[in-house]
Image (cartoon, rainbow, N blue to C red):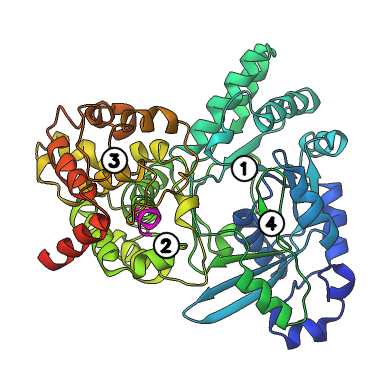
Amino acid sequence: MTLNKTTLNNKDFWLSKGYSLPQFDLNAVAEKTQQAPIWLHFGAGNIFRCFPALAHQKLLNNKLASTGIVVCEMFDDEIIDKAFTPFDNLNITVTAKNGSTEKTVVASITSALKGSSTAQLDHIFTSPSLQIVSYTITEKGYHPTEKVIIKTAELLYKRWLANAAPLALLSMDNCTHNGQKLKSAVIACIKQQQMPEKLLTYINEKVSFPLSMIDKITPRPSIRVQKMLADDGIETEIVCTAKNTYTSSFVNAETTEYLVIEDNFPNGRPSLEHAGIIFTNAQTVNMVEKMKVCTCLNPLHTVLAVFGCLLGYKTIWQSIEDKGLKHLVEKIGYTECLPVVTDPVIINPQAFLHAVLNERFPNPFIPDTPQRIACDTSQKIPIRFGQTLKIYAQRENITELTYIPIFIAGWLRYLLALDDNGVPFTLSPDPRLNELTAHLTEIKLQGTITQKINLILSDKSIFGIDLVKHGLNKKVEAHFAQMISGTGAVRKLLHCLLLSH
């Protein structure tokens, strides 16, 4: 059985295998969407397919919406060709927690376009009915020269000429102040393209850029899940595109999910609060985002990734099974990060952190790799650790930190591209990789630390503060010296840490 609208008519088959099916007329919803589109989304990746799209399906199932979502992929056309078109834009979302599995056929995406689909995009953007244009394009996508931003600027210009109807442009990417980043990129693009000043007036008066915080771990398609579907009689294929995107007709993800959005939609919005989405004010979104990105999840993910690479683990869940490594992330989370978090009230930070460490990271159903999470670490540290470091520096007790310096030393050790057994490995992509590794070229296992290490530790663009100026470099250097003392030194340090605390 292959997933498509025709095979979906065989409801007895799908239901007998435990699949939840859409409870609405797919063709009628597609027709209404074509006539009066409400929601366009840029970015055909996994997190959108298994989270916002599934949330909207709940509205359709309960007759709280009558139109679907149009998705457009601007970066990797193969995703549309390989994971959408052959399956009539349907996908199977598979979630698992504590051994139980939920399988849902998602049909809320009524059409999937490429950036070259000019006529369709023009029609959607000039429709007065359009309420939301959302984005999951990764943090790198928010630059005025990126195709998706240029396309957005062009389409806003056409909407302004057609009817100047209000609109919300909603970033759902996992980055700080995402709505502001989107607005800045769009405005910079408009200025670079020398579009009319009145277009900027329209944007400032009638176009909103709500902030949001999204949280759901959605790794690449799992072979384990593919086998489970095959056992059900469902044929699937995991595709790696020419741009190194892994995609399929199914998406596997954890059950836990949060989407908190600033409620600022000048042309209205779907009632997604009935599907578990939280709408609030901008201040609360910022607090939730800081709690997650700066304290309770993202920093610990990076710690597990860096040390997971050093210790040879292939998944994040294997990394946190390591007792020494779990102890380290617990200490960083509970002892050093949690005391400086701002409580957003709508989500309890301690409960959130507990779930991350004891339910989410250890979930073997989520085969996320340390190597993927370790990408762009130099760009992540200022966000994931910089805020905490700044607070301790302002309180003048930064030298009392014990566990974050161990992570920083571990990252420097990682940059040597030798695992704990002294075996070379490939570093994950990072825009500053050549520069950073150049400072460490003279350092090898059983070697000595050079003063060049302070060129990294004093870099405010990485840590948010100058670690040398604030005296934290001494602890980092001491831990780093331990980690380069020979093979097995990283494991030994973690073991000693576990025994002593």
Magenta residues span 307-311
Q: Nearer the viewer, residue 386 or 121?
A: 386
Rounded to the nearest angstrom, the CA distance separating label 1 from label 4 is 18 Å
2 or 4: tag closer to the N-terminus: 4
Q: Are marks 2 and 3 in contact (CB under 8 Å)?
A: no
Return the mark for residue 135: 1
- Residue 437 shown in magenta: no
Residue 223's spot in the image, x, y percent? 63, 69
Return the mark for residue 247: 4
Rounded to the nearest angstrom, the CA distance separating label 1 from label 3 is 43 Å
Q: Nearer the viewer, mark 2 or mark 3?
A: 3
Q: Nearer the viewer, residue 33 or 148?
A: 148
1 or 4: tag closer to the N-terminus: 1
Find disc 3 in the rendering and name its residue: 444
Other residues around mark 1 within 10 Å, as few (<14) / some (14–19) / many (≥20): many
Q: Main secondary structure of the magenta part?
A: helix
* Quadrant position of the C terminus in the picture: bottom left
Find disc 2 in the rendering and name its residue: 313
Q: Amino acid at mark 2?
A: Tyr
Say left or right for 81 vs 428: right
3 or 4: tag closer to the N-terminus: 4
Q: Are marks 2 and 4 in contact (CB under 8 Å)?
A: no
Rounded to the nearest angstrom, the CA distance separating label 2 from label 4 is 23 Å
1 or 3: tag closer to the N-terminus: 1
Rounded to the nearest angstrom, the CA distance separating label 2 from label 3 is 22 Å
Q: Are marks 1 and 4 in contact (CB under 8 Å)?
A: no
Residue at image location 25% in from the left, 62% down from the top:
330
Residue 206, placed above or below residue 246: above
Residue 490's spot in the image, x, y percent? 26, 55
Q: Are marks 2 and 1 in contact (CB under 8 Å)?
A: no
Residue at image location 56% in from the left, 59% down from the top:
219
